[in-house]
Image: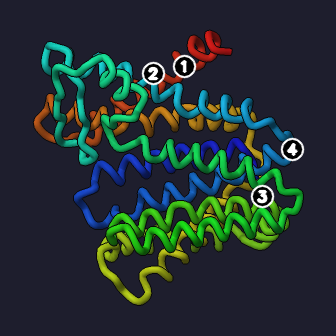
Amino acid sequence: MNKAITDSIKFICCIGIFIHHFYLHSPYVGFLGPTACVIFFFLSAYGISVSLEKKPMALLPFIKKRLFKIYLPLLMINTLFILGTGLLCKGYFSIPIFNIFGDNIDFVQNVSTLDLFLYIVGIYKIDGVTWFLNVLFAMYLFLWFIHKMANKTQRIIVTSIAYSIFVIGCINITPLPVKFGLIFDPLGIVIGVLFAEKKQLIEYIQSRITTKLIILIGIIVFTLVFLMGTMQNIEGRYTKLILLIVAVLSIIFTTALATGKPTKKFSSISTFLGGISFFVYLTHEKIANIVFYFRGSSSLVLTSIGICIISVVLYLFYQKIIIKIYG
């Protein structure tokens, strides 16, 4: 798959997650976020698996690289918003706790130095984004360990067994609305490993699917995504089957799109969009809440503008300053 195209897809997925959270009260976007997550997990699992196949790494350098990539932007952004939001909104320092619906900020005062540190590093949550980072890091570690197996079939089998155990656990211990997302999202990891180990599947999809079929699959996926939003609280006979169909079709759709050779200009733009996508994800809940705080109501336009500006500034700062400092 072409990295420039997958970078663009990751950016679109982050926009989908933002829209999902912004209109979370609406049943029609109830499964837009999980669908974006399953695609993101698929692309990440595929990319890491291919990377480890080409260039194996020792465990400690691998962990250091992944910690740097995932958690350093989180530390930077949490520090900025924790130190700045209370002063901006209240005129004095306090810890902001952002609402996933983007319509309320709770402020915690008189925190200890230890509590401040725990909020900054994400152990104490100020919003709902850290779960994804933790799952992503756990996925990285899992993929590193299974790539110590020489046999590709073993990797696929172990990944499938791990996912099955995870699903059984979710079915037994989690409530229904949470259960759907937990079962749905990691399926992208399983298929990502499968496609990385059996690349002929990608070649088959990309050689057989025409432009008209890509459009048709896209229409089916988006239709089912919006239908699933109204069904996610219903224990229906066919709900899990539809979940599986949405996951598989969305990944086939993504794989079919990620073919071709984009122009140099498209590649540079796509690389930039892929770079800021992580910052869009980390800031979208925070900015939506701040906009609501000052307006007294939500604004998709103002929130989108704020996310774009802040994400680009933070991404450039991260690229030009932070990466140079830490190498």
Label 2: which secondary element: helix
Give the image quarter of residue 289: top left
List x then y, in percent, for residue 9. Answer: 58, 49
Q: Earlier in the sequence, mark 1 or mark 3?
A: 3
Q: Are marks 3 and 2 in contact (CB under 8 Å)?
A: no
Mark toward the start of the polypeptide (4 vs 3) = 4
Lateral position of residue 213 relative to residue 310, left or right = right
Query: In the rendered picture of this protein, how many numbered marks are placed on residues?
Result: 4
Q: Are marks 4 and 1 in contact (CB under 8 Å)?
A: no
Tell me the residue that label 1 is attached to. 318
Distance of label 3 from label 2 (alpha carbons): 33 Å
Color theme of the render: rainbow
Which residue in the structure is indicated by mark 4?
54
Q: Could you give the CA–CA distance between mark 2 and mark 4, rounded to whole angstroms?
A: 31 Å
Residue 94 on image: x %, y %: 20, 21
Q: Are marks 1 and 2 in contact (CB under 8 Å)?
A: yes
Q: Which mark is residue 76?
A: 2
Callout 4 secondary element: helix
Sort mark 1 into few (<14), some (14-19) or many (20+) by Cα contacts within 10 Å: some
Callout 1 secondary element: helix
Q: Which residue is mark 3?
A: 196
Give yes or no for contact between labels 4 and 3 (Cβ–Cβ under 8 Å): no
Crowd band around label 2 with a 10 angstrom C-alpha radius: few (<14), some (14–19), many (20+)? some
Identify which amino acid the numbered label 3 is placed on: Ala
How far apart marks 1 and 3 lie (CA) works out to: 30 Å
Looking at the rendered structure, the kind of residue marked 4 is: Lys
Amino acid of disc 2? Met
Per the model, the C-alpha gap separating discs 1 and 2 is: 9 Å
Q: Is residue 239 above or below residue 63?
A: below
Question: Considering only order in the chain, which callout, 1 or 4, is on the residue closer to the N terminus?
Answer: 4
Give the percent coordinates (x, y) of residue 133. 50, 42
